[in-house]
Amino acid sequence: MLAELRRLVGIGAALLALAFAQSARADAQQVATAEGVRCSVAYHGAELLHHGYFPIDVEMLNTGDRAVTVDFKAQQQWQVEDEVTKRLRLEPGEQVAFEPLLRARTNSVNTYAVTFEVNGESQYFAVGPSEWSGGFEVPVLFASRSPVEAGAVERWASTWTDRGTGDFRFAAVRFPELSKLWAAYTSYEWVVLSLEQGLPDAAALDAIFAWVRTGGRLLVIAPNPRAALESRPQDAKWLSPDYAVRESQPERFAAYHCGYGTITLFSAQGWGFEEMESVDGYQPAALSAVDYWSGRSWTPGSDSHAQSGMESVTPLLGGFGELPLRGLMVLLVVFALVMGPVNFWWVKRSRKPMLLLVTLPGISVVTSICLVLFGVFSQGLDLKVSTRSFTFLDQSAHQATTAEVRRIFAGSSPGAGMRPEAGTTVFPDVGSWSSDFRGTNLFTQDLTDGRLLGGDYLPVREPVVQLILSDRPTRLRLDVTERAGEVEVANAFDGPIERLLLRDSSGAFHQLNGALAAGESRRLVGGASVRDEFDWSVVMRDFWDTRGAGAPELPAGAYLAVLQTADLRDDCGVEVNEVSAQHVVFGVYAEGAER
């Protein structure tokens, strides 16, 4: 009891220190010692975030002469509760560093109470964004090798905001502070990289480009931004006319699709906001001049906008988990008849009125059991899912970026919880919880052995909607052979291909007649009407729009395939029963298309 009281007092003191004193800067490292373990924590980022995940830097050093067990916990209890835990055993002199990702929520102060506990002794910190997250703020992260000059952040934020396109909130960090986890950037609308003094660490840049592929928007500023990216051919190859969104002034300003996101190049010195003002048609909220959906369709939880791609796809999912009302009504009517007229007629006929003391509770118990069984068996005990997934597959890099929106219902306990693979991030749809102020929902992450998501990430007998983004390596592919205007394909996916539209390297369209089983090969059918005959409703504006005009288009050397099975998604360690599904692959198989 005393230990619990000390814990509550410590957490309260940490939060009060932030709320009233705000003595620590956002980028300052906070350090304390518990039972010989030196614990430090730091946050490098914007003071206002309202969606996605953000990282904190955690370090622990055992300065003692014996091994100890450290329990780390980061907790947020405003409206809904988030809890991130990790247990570590430190040998004498051992140092451990890790970067947990904490969930940012709207209409909240996203400050977490961080606890280190060693042998009953605890240290507490208040870490994370300190401003109230509400309204239409647009978080932007700016990164450079050298420190940002005084006042530059304020000038840029003012320049962008004065255009009437939103309230922009900038955070400036140096390259060493950039996260190496792509999900750490999902709390930002834009990431701006100043590359005039070189590139950041390769691992951090890999994470940023993975974030772009999952729907992020990157602005690269340098005297020659295209040349600055030449050392990364796996990313620079998308800076071609085939993937252009805008190239009206390619030597100064150009934007390109990369996966679901966009890369914008701007030739300038330093921050370049003054030069950017002179660009024809410049709009700070949409530097890439992308149609609304193509730049944002899978940006998770973007509460600064009235509608997100996740919300637009959700109504297309099949419903389940609801009780059949007609059956329930029949059961209740039967109960009323048996409990009332039938029961009293039978007691009266038996001339034993005292039987009512037995029949009334007996009928109630039997009916209650029937109602429970009716609900259980009508909804089922398995884990049902209604899903739509879309995968951007870069076959030359063996990289698959999958966006899946699914409605999921667990009829019984799914076990310990969800275990996403490396490169996968789960975003729960908590829009319904953000306004009820009940504070009864708990989202847990246990980082002790990998990553285990529990609590209301997957509740029992309550249908929920999830957005799952993954960026992972894969060897699954469509093998394409082009010969004298003819195209032959071989299905190297795990399951059948239901439909296929392919545009070869010369720009001609070809389609598949009938389904193609895994391992089979077939020659495609070409023709002038092939493109118009394809059912483009499987793509929609939500997924891909290469010209920003609301009409999807395939670049040369690419294909669209509708798969019968979910070959490229991550089920996060739980076995699901697909009630309804659609799995689409946007594959790129050739580079340097002929024009």
Image (cartoon, rainbow, N blue to C red):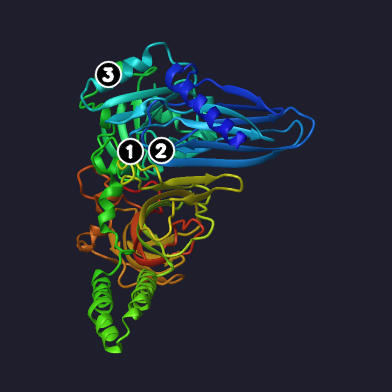
Q: Where 146 falls versus 55 (above or below)? A: above
Task: Work out which residue is located at the far bottom of the displayed protein and give it.
Answer: 349
Q: Position of residue 98 (x, y in %)?
A: 59, 35
Mark 2 vs mark 3: in front: 2
What residue is shown with label 1? 256
Residue corresponding to mark 3: 159
User: Tag 1's secondary structure?
Assistant: strand
Of badges 3 and 1, nearer the viewer stands: 3
- Tag on residue 186? 2
Which mark is first along the chain, 1 or 3?
3
Could one spot residue 318 in this view of the protein?
A: yes
Q: CA distance from mark 3 to mark 1?
A: 24 Å
Specify which label sits upstream in the sequence, 1 or 2: 2
Cβ atoms under marks 3 and 1 closer than 8 Å: no
Disc 2 marks a residue whose amino acid type is: Thr
* In the image: residue 96, left or right of residue 5: right
